[in-house]
Image (cartoon, rainbow, N blue to C red):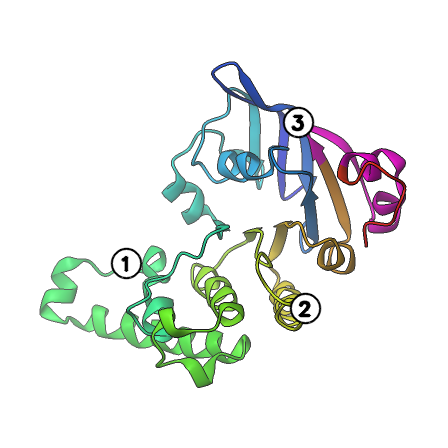
Amino acid sequence: MALLAVAGLTKHFGGVTALENLDLSLEPGEIFGLIGPNGAGKTTLFNVITGFEAPTAGRVIFQGTDISGLPPHRIANAGVIRTYQKTSVFPQLTVLENLLIGRHRRTSAGLTDALFRTGRHRAEHAADRRMAEGTLAFLDLQREREWRAGALPYGLLRKLEIAIALMAEPIVLCLDEPAAGLNPTDTHTLREAIARVRTQGVTIILVEHNMELVMNLCERIAVLNFGRKLMEGPPAVVQSHPEVVRVYLGEAVSLA
């Protein structure tokens, strides 16, 4: 059984069809690439999977349960976590503080516990801090732990967003254009970070326009065009498919 699947997924915005009868499945432990030109429906698909948009038709199945149309917090609590095209950190807080905020969905202590600093609150805070420190070490961000997030170089800011997502203990991590705006050195560092995340048992869906990153990182790739799946397969097949090349560039050249 697939870990995550969409079946017959359709999304209309008025008279515009953003997704049309889309079928995809994600296997446990893989890095799955999702590519296509601007307006192909990639971010809409992420929005539907993570509950920010309700599907017009079709289903989203996660671990055998239909999660179609559930609110985002319930889908996140189930283990489907996403990042965004635009950076989404608290710039005035430190790197460490941002990670601790990312832990809030897994915290059971309430407002009363926090006000009176109960034993449960202290125990959870200590555990969350240990996890945050471990996550910083895992993604090589220890040196920046006390930096204001807004002062980070852009490449480290992208890594921080992944670190914050990991604090929510994702089963599936949806990465929306994480390499956007990165130079080649930072892109290489990001690629290593994503590969490292997968070693922790996290399954990854990657939406990305950097074809070199996608082709070297993903086991399978689906190509969307005007909300439909144009094709799906391993990188070598996808990058040589004449229709994919035509959609991207209008001529027969390699995408990698």
Please, which residue is most extreme toward the left here? Answer: 116
Which label lies toward us, 3 or 2?
2
Relative horizontal placement of residue 31, taking residue 42 as reference (left or right): right
Please, which residue is most extreme toward the top here? Answer: 15
Residue beneath label 1, please?
Answer: 108
Cα separation, mark 3 vs mark 1, equals 43 Å
Which label lies toward us, 1 or 2?
2
Residue 64 image point, x, y percent: 58, 37
- Which picture quadrant has residue 116? bottom left
Residue 44 image point, x, y percent: 53, 34
Q: From the viewer's perspective, is residue 62 above or below residue 183?
A: above
Residue 124 appears in the picture as rendered: yes
Residue beneath label 3, please?
Answer: 226
Q: Residue 92 carries which label?
A: none
In magenta segment, residue 170? no
Residue 234 image point, x, y percent: 83, 48
What type is the residue that disc 3 sits on?
Phe
Q: Earlier in the sequence, mark 1 or mark 2?
A: 1
Span highlighted in magenta in the image: 224-247
Cα separation, mark 1 vs mark 2, equals 41 Å
Residue beneath label 2, please?
Answer: 184
Residue 1 appears in the picture as rendered: no
SS under mark 3: loop
